[in-house]
Each structure stands twice: as C-alpha cells, then as structure tokens.
Amino acid sequence: MRQHTRANGIRRKAGRESPYGRSESGERVGSERESAEPISYEPISYLGMRPAPFASLPSAMCPAPLPCHTGYMSTSHTIPIAVSARNLSKTYAGESPVQALRDISIDFERGKFTAIMGPSGSGKSTLLHTLATLDAPDPGEQTSVQVKGVELTGLKDAALAEFRARNIGFIFQAFNLIPTLTAAQNMELPLGLAKMAVDTIWRDELVRTLGLEDRLKHLPSQLSGGQQQRVAIARALLPRPAVIFADEPTGALDSATSAEVLGLLQQASREQGQTILMVTHDPLAASYADRVLLLKDGQLAGGLEAPTQASVLSALARLGD
Ligand SMILES: Nc1ncnc2c1ncn2[C@@H]1O[C@H](COP(=O)(O)OP(=O)(O)O)[C@@H](O)[C@H]1O
Ligand SMILES: [Mg+2]
C-alpha cells in the first residue's frame, strides 16, 4: 500500500470536508478567496507585468536542452504549469566559484506534489531558492523562471517580494524565524506583510495539527528545533499560497509529526490544487509525493512517478553508481 494513505490520519473536525478552510457551515472564513474554487491559473497581469508566453508554448517549441519527452517539461497543456524554469544556472562567486545549477529546464504542474532528492551538495536547496526567487540565477538570455505564468527573472526586489507574499510559501531548511517575535507572531507575519486577513479557523487547525497550542507565546529561542520547524511550516501554510517550497521540512521532526506534516502537504496539493516542491533525503517522505526528481551535480538526473519507498531507494542507489 502506498505510504501516503497515512495522510488519512490527519485529525479533522466533524462536519468539515478537510482541514483546508471551510467552517462547519461550509463557508470559507476570513480567507482571501471567497469560495473553495481551485486556485485560478488564468494568465494574470501582476503589478503591470505581462505573463510571458512559456506556459502556453506548444511542446514542439519547448526549448532545448532537454527533450520534452523526458517528462521534465510539460508535453500537454491540459494541466496548467505552476512553476517553470528554462536554462537555469547558478554559480556562487568567490575565490573558487561553485556552479551549483547547470542549465536546468523543468515544469511543475499545478496541484502536483514533487519531491526533490539527490546527494548533499547536488543543488537541491539552490534550485528551490532560485525557483522561489529568493536567489537570482545566473543572467542569461534564455533564462526564465515563471510562477503562475508570470516571468519573474529581472523583476525588482519590491515587486518580487510582493509577488512572493501573495503566491509563495517557503519552509526553510534553517527555519528562519524572526527571533524577537513569538511563535504566533511569526506564523502570522507573512499575512500581515501581504495585508491579508488571518483565517482563524485554519490557523487554529494548523496549530492543533502541529501540536503548537502551548507554544504560541514562546520566542524561537525558547523552542526546540522540531517546534521551530513546526512554526515555520504553519507560517508557510497559513496564507494557503499557490506554491509551497519546502526544504527538508521534516528534518527535525519525529516520525508521527512528520506523517502529519506530509499529510498536510499532500492534502494541500490534492484538495486545494496547491503546488508543492519538497526537498527531502527521506524515501518515506518522498513516497507521499506524486513524483520524485533526482538531482546530481547541479543537473537533473532522472525522475519517478508515483514513488514508493522501495522505488525511491533503488533510484537513489542507481544515482550513486
Ligand atoms: N552561499 C553559497 N556560497 C558558495 N557556495 C554555496 C553557497 N550555497 C551553496 N553552495 C554550494 O553549492 C552547491 C549546492 O549547494 P546546495 O544547493 O545547498 O546543495 P544541497 O541542498 O543539495 O545539499 C554545494 O557545492 C554548496 O557547497
Ligand atoms: Mg540543502
């Protein structure tokens, strides 16, 4: 049996369809969106930006270097592309420069939960950071990063920050909580910055599911690593962003809490159409995803659909050969 059925173990309130934002009466409460309609992926004009044409290119026009049939890039356009990169490279400058990403082209469909795996130093965190626009890729004429069809390369910091606040949740490997804010304040900070209302029912659900009820008034320094990670997860999930980037989100968690978190991510993708990109080194965590992408030496090195723990383990073993 697939491991992700464990997501059914998520605690749910009676009478609710899912932990994703309907009140007992079935109404969405305090959310930016009025209804539980799937997230819109209509081409949008954001801050005056025009959506670039990539998402609607016929597959025959998919740019090199990877052939479209590898599955790295979309061949059909019935499912909208939530995140797309073309010719993405990243070099860390310095005395001995490191090329962390080498010419990566890839699509992530809306509502898909992808696990990204590979050896330490293979570029997983760098890929997540550049796709989430937290770090700039090497400049290049063909280089493109799009989220929800909006071309993000070359945008100014303020426009990027606003786009991220409204569309992207990021769970950092090192948590990145604000040390002077309590757990509750940290959780609600992105919503405050985006001037969005807090969905208190969803917040309370997250707090309960993540076991943070007794820790809301604590500062990060008063929390264990696992508790800080759970606050960071709640912070990313609370605004229900269209895309969630998670860098080893279960690295500091015990197995029961890991299962809860992975179940939350799985439900976010299946029930809300949120797109999840999760870096993990754990085959069990990866088995919750719809597909696994393998990275090696800053390049895509294969992938798996409908991964199981066993298929992930053997793919990782082949990668090491
Ligand atoms: N800020 C940085 N400055 C210089 N090199 C870096 C920096 N961040 C990462 N690297 C290097 O880039 C490569 C990829 O790193 P990273 O993306 O963190 O890999 P992973 O997440 O797969 O472990 C590694 O060789 C790492 O040492
Ligand atoms: Mg990393």
Image (cartoon, grey):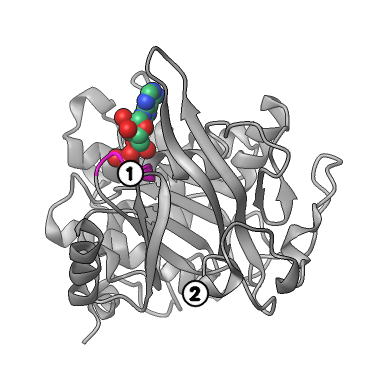
Q: Main secondary structure of the magenta part?
A: loop
Type of residue at label 1?
Answer: Ser
* Quadrant of the image containing the N terminus: bottom left
Q: Is residue 164 above or below residue 199?
A: above
* Quadrant of the image containing the C terminus: bottom left
Compared across the picture, whether 277 is left or right of 117 comes to right
The part of the chain drawn in magenta is 120-124
At x 38% / y 42%, what residue is drawn?
123
Circle 2 or circle 1, nearest the eye: 1
Checking the image for residue 271, the label placed there is 2
Residue matched to label 1: 122
Compared across the picture, whether 152 is left or right of 3 comes to right
**Mark 1 nearby-residue class (10 Å; few <14, some 14–19, many ≥20):** some
Asked which quadrant contains residue 115, the reply is bottom left
The percent coordinates of residue 137 (x first, y second) are: 57, 34
The percent coordinates of residue 256 (x first, y second) are: 15, 61
Real-space CA distance between mark 2 and mark 1, rounded to the nearest whole angstrom: 32 Å
- For the residues labelled 2 and 1, say whether their Cβ atoms are less than 8 Å apart: no
Secondary-structure class at tag 1: loop
At x 35% / y 41%, what residue is drawn?
232
